[in-house]
């Protein structure tokens, strides 16, 4: 599989089949917390990266071979709205499968009407907004020079007016950068003006692009969650366990997933339904074969494809 990965346990979407329609690493941002690594192509111009029919065929083929999943999710190695075929892909999926479609986006291109139209048929859209002041925005997201935070906020607000389904807005909180009271108070005002069905607080729990990026403690997240009100939640644990893939399949599943995000042993146990003991043994073998590597971050061991 070239474009489809998983299904993987997702903190927000339960059990999700990932679709990656962006080459690593094209993005409109170069976030300091990015778990994929540094952006090599920071762009805002949309284009067709791959043959969309091949992507559709691959997704449909995969859905016929796996058990039930909660979502087909466009996410992956960069910003999915940079792919100009996204609208066609979503429309084709809606025609060919009953599985709900989710789009995880950084929201930066929602000021473009063509992007808003492209994702209007998704069942849920998950944009992010990590800052509301220009300095903080530049510090965290390191956007393409043509982007400004006002433009991003206004794009998300316009999309809200046009889109009747659910928007789940993610805020990545980073120690000493966007956890200051002034920024949070401003953020609260703007976020309540957007009117997302859910506001989801996250912090840096996976190895970030910049090693110095710090996470918030649980009690700090709880305090900020209270500040944002009843629509706000902290996203921090996997809730679902996967259907069991065959043993032959699971190595591929893990490698394809590890190419796009680092996982802990716990994540891999949830993805494969192997026991901890079995998963450890397989990971050790894969590491010895040079397929993956492991490293320590915040007291957790993460695995990543080499
Ligand atoms: S975290 Fe998302 S938006 Fe930020 S650089 Fe990585 S892929 Fe792009």
Image: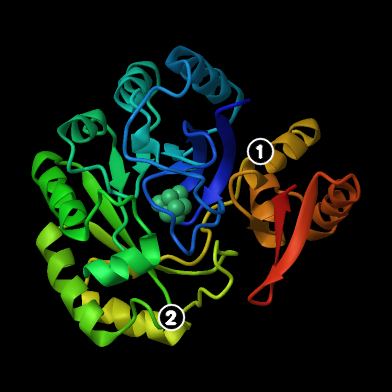
Q: Classify mark 1: helix, strand or loop.
A: helix
Q: Classify mark 2: helix, strand or loop.
A: loop
- On residue 197, the disc is none
Q: How is the image coloured?
A: rainbow
The residue where tag 1 is placed is 256
Above-or-below relation of 37 to 70:
below
Does residue 226 appear to the left or right of 103 in the view shown? Answer: left
Residue 101 visible in rendering? no
Q: Residue at x 24, y 78 (%)?
A: 184
Whether tag 2 and tag 1 are in contact, CB under 8 A, the answer is no
Q: Nearer the viewer, residue 226 or 36?
A: 36
Question: Which badge, 2 or 1, is on the more N-terminal residue?
Answer: 2
Q: Marks 2 and 1: which is nearer the front?
A: 2
The residue where tag 2 is placed is 175
Residue 53 in the image: state x and y as whole percent.
45, 13
Residue 10 visible in rendering? yes
Give residue 228's quadrant in the image.
Answer: bottom left
Above-or-below relation of 248 to 200:
above
Residue 303 in the image: state x and y as whole percent.
72, 56
Looking at mark 2, is its residue's CB closer than 8 Å to ligand 1?
A: no
Does residue 142 appear to the left or right of 230 in the view shown? Answer: right
Q: Residue at x 30, y 80 (%)?
A: 224
Residue 100 in the image: state x and y as whole percent.
36, 34
């Amino acid at each position: 599989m070239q474009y489809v990965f998983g299904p993987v346990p997702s903190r927000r979407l339960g059990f999700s089949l990932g679709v990656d329609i962006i080459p690593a690493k094209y993005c409109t941002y170069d976030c300091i917390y990015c778990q994929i690594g540094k952006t090599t192509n920071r762009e805002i111009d949309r284009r067709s990266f791959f043959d969309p029919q091949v992507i559709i065929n691959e997704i449909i083929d995969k859905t016929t071979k796996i058990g039930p999943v909660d979502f087909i999710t466009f996410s992956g190695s960069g910003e999915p709205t940079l792919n100009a075929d996204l609208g066609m892909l979503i429309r084709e999926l809606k025609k060919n499968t009953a599985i709900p479609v989710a789009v995880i986006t950084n929201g930066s291109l929602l000021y473009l009407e063509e992007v808003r139209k492209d994702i209007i048929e998704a069942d849920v859209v998950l944009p992010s907004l990590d800052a509301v002041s220009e300095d903080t925005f530049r510090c965290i997201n390191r956007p393409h020079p043509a982007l400004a935070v006002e433009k991003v906020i206004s794009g998300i607000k316009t999309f809200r007016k046009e889109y009747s389904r659910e928007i789940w807005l993610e805020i990545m909180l980073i120690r000493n950068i966007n956890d200051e009271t002034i920024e949070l108070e401003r953020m609260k005002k703007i976020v309540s003006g957007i009117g997302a069905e859910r506001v989801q607080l996250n912090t840096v729990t996976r190895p970030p692009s910049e090693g110095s990026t710090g996470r918030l403690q649980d009690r700090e997240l709880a305090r900020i969650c209270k500040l944002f009100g009843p629509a706000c939640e902290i996203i921090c644990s996997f809730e679902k366990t996967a259907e069991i893939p065959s043993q032959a399949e699971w190595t591929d599943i893990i490698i394809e997933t590890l190419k796009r995000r680092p996982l802990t042993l716990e994540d891999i146990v949830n993805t494969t339904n192997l026991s901890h003991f079995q998963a450890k043994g397989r990971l050790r073998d894969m590491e010895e074969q040079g397929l993956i590597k492991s490293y320590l971050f915040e007291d957790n061991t993460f695995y990543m494809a080499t």
